[in-house]
Image (cartoon, helix red, strand yellow):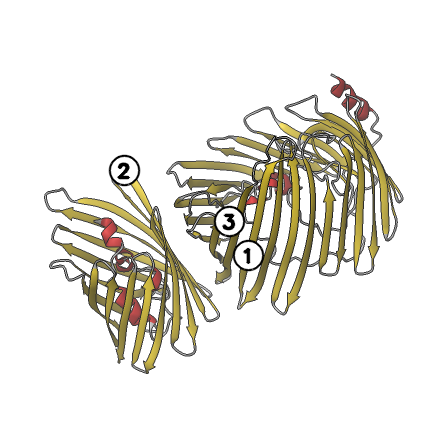
Amino acid sequence: MRARVAIALVAASVVAGCAGSAPRPMGDGAARATGGDVVWGDEYEGVLLDTDPEDAHFGDGSAFAADALLGETRVTRARAAVGPLSVVVRQSDGPPVGALAWNARRAGVVVGAVRPTLAEGAVVADARASGAVEPRATPRVDGLRLAPSSSTWGSFDGAGARVSLGGLRLSAGAWRDRAHPERAAAWSSLGIAGARSAGGIAAGRTPAGASALSLYGARATGPGFVAAETGLAPDGIRGVLRGVVGPWRVLLASGAVAAAHDPLPASAARRWGAGVERRATLGRIATRTLVSSRTRRDGATVEWRQRVDWSGAAMLDGARLETGVRATRTRARVAAGLLDAPAPPDKEDEVRARVAVRTAGDRDGALRVEQLWQLDLVATGGESDLGRVALWQGRASTGHADVRLRVTAFDLGNGQLAYAGRAALPGAATFTTLSRSGVDVSASLALRLGWGMSTGVQAVRAPAGASRVVVRVGVDW
Amino acid sequence: MRTVLRSLPVLWLCVVIVAAPRASAQVAFPSVEERVLGVRGDGAGMHGGPDGGRARIEFGDMELFGIAGLRISGARLFTAVRGVPVGAELARLGSPVGAQQRACGSIGWRGDRWRASLRAGVESLALRGAATESSPVIGLASAADVGSLSLSADVETIAGGGDRAWLLALAMTGRIGARASVVTSLRYDGPGALALGVAAIAPLHSRLSLLAGYDDGTETLRVAAVIATGRWRVASGVFRHPVLGQSQGLSLAGDW
């Protein structure tokens, strides 16, 4: 009840505007994208592949878009936009989830399902993107920001508003966990942005009376920028320092735990991490090297993870060659003092390597064919066999039809896991976890029927032999 | 029996024949024989229809492990009808306990540095004392050229006995110099097997090439020689399995 009151109070205080703010460039410090976008799989902590793709792309640029996915799980989505006003809604197994937003240049309002973020994520972070210790290159520095969402699990029920006056930006919002209404918070932030600097302060409070404070700032420094945030949360001081200078990116984080279902972090889960990333281009070869270390304490368990990740990409006669190696060492044990005799830590070492080739060609300019060949090797400590995952994907598309076939064959040892995407309909990307051996086959066909209407079908044959078919019908005006 | 078929090496020699002189212009349809023989992977860049001519025909025969009555033979034809690549393939594995036969037809497409073909056919298994079992076969093969590399993929599904088997073979042929090639392959024939293979093709003379390779899935060492004369290419090879023993075969391919 108190959470509802808090939400109502904040919503009532809305003057105008959505909490989402336009990104403010602060220099050209972002390194160019390279072949470092290799998804290995256990990024699931931060949910890369698992992100609801429809939130990001469904209906983008359209006045109205709606579709229905008819399969084992039925999903209905709709998005409409008229000028600064937009609405998005998604209905799956449970009640509909969606948001109404009005987003003008100087003000904005959002009501419904929201994904809150604040500055560098030291205190409040998007649950869908804060898992890995990877320094972002984006120079944007926002205060409180509530993005409209239709994600069932990655959003909160809430409302927020933003007002921008020159360089001043005032945001306020409140939200609560959909499944646990007692987990709620109300936040507000005041930020100021100049030509090369930005900063602000934010404060939050829970219905139970717990408070939190955040100070953030950023400054462009010639070839890059530095951003920092320090927060005072109920469980202690948190901080994030992020810097981008030329090809280098550095991240130091304390307490930047994914804030999912924890609007005002006070949980036992804590995280400390550091990551250094370098992106470089040598001729036609682009490389990315990331060295990171993360410590996470979740209740009585403390886990350390060190990782070295290298990937590279090169254009070769019209094809894209991608390769990468990632080595991870993980140690976990019960925190000291909780056992009479400390148990030895659980150890897990893992090395993954990948090579992939992407090709694209056409036939008379009308039929475009894209193909992907990929081989993954997985080695884990304690398992003598080298796990193998072979993947081929073909895609043929014309202006009206898009056909995809993806076949993943795998042979993995005990305890080895791999992750594979699937051929999917637009806005319905899926992936699966692989173990042991088998083959995962997926295919999709999407058709544009004219008048903005489209339809499609996706078929999946899982390694265990189960089959699944999803039919999609939609309009996009 | 089917498993045996998929793990035996034979008309791979056809692959040798075509791959030896020029790997770039082939890759199109890994054939029935190669799949039956379990050597599709080696066949990356193997064949794909007429190499500048109107038609190609291939024959192959191999005795397996010195076992009387255990041999595999086959033929395939590739041509183009009004610019559309088409092909037909027949293969037969005879053994003392029965025979397996396979017939497929294929149709292809060619684009800018890529090729693809769709095939359909039937596989029949006739064991002595048992009814003949037939299974429909559908396959898709695709390939692309990237500089001096040729990449190929072959996906096939066979329905039968209330089950459906899926097969996948990926291969890469790298050309070194004018005619030498290295072929690496990855083949999935069923649960528990994702086999790697590697083979090298070295030209000794304008009319003579040698091939040597190893397939991890069948644990087979392979050595072959290819002689090219006019429109014909003749290959003879030996396959050595550490337990089953030695197999040997001959193949013949011609272009018009």
Report the mark closest to the observer, 2 or 1: 1
Rendering coords of residue A443 (x, y %): 44, 45
**What is the secondary structure assignment of the residue under circle 3?**
loop
Judging depth in this view, the residue of A346 and A122 nearest the camera is A346
Amino acid at circle 3:
His
Indicate the quadrant where residue A222 lies.
Answer: bottom right
Between residue B69 and residue A404, name the one nearer to us. B69
Determine whether label 2 and label 1 are within 8 Å by CB: no
Residue pictured at 11% horizontal, 46% vertical: B128
Q: Amino acid at mark 2?
A: Gly
Residue under mark 3: which chain is it in?
Answer: A
Label 3 and label 2: CA atoms lie apart by 36 Å
Question: Secondary structure under badge 2?
Answer: loop
According to the image, label 1 marks what residue?
A325
The C terminus of chain B: image quadrant: bottom left
Residue at numbered disc 3 = A400
Secondary structure beneath dot 1 equals strand
* Above/below status of A321 relative to A213: below
Circle 1 or circle 3, nearest the eye: 1
How far across and how far down the image is residue A282, in percent?
Answer: 64, 68
Three-letter code for the amino acid on which mark 1 is drawn: Val
Is A393 placed left or right of B104 in the picture? right
Q: Which residue is mark 2?
A: B162
Q: Can residue B78 be spotted in the picture? A: no
Q: Earlier in the sequence, mark 1 or mark 3?
A: 1
Residue at the spot x=46%, y=36% of the render?
A: A470
Q: Are marks 3 and 2 on the same chain?
A: no
Indicate which label's residue lies in the foreground, 3 or 2: 2
B215, above or below A52, in the image: below
Is residue A362 in view?
yes
Measuring 38% from the left and 71% from the top, which residue is drawn there? B23
Q: CA distance from mark 1 to mark 3?
A: 38 Å
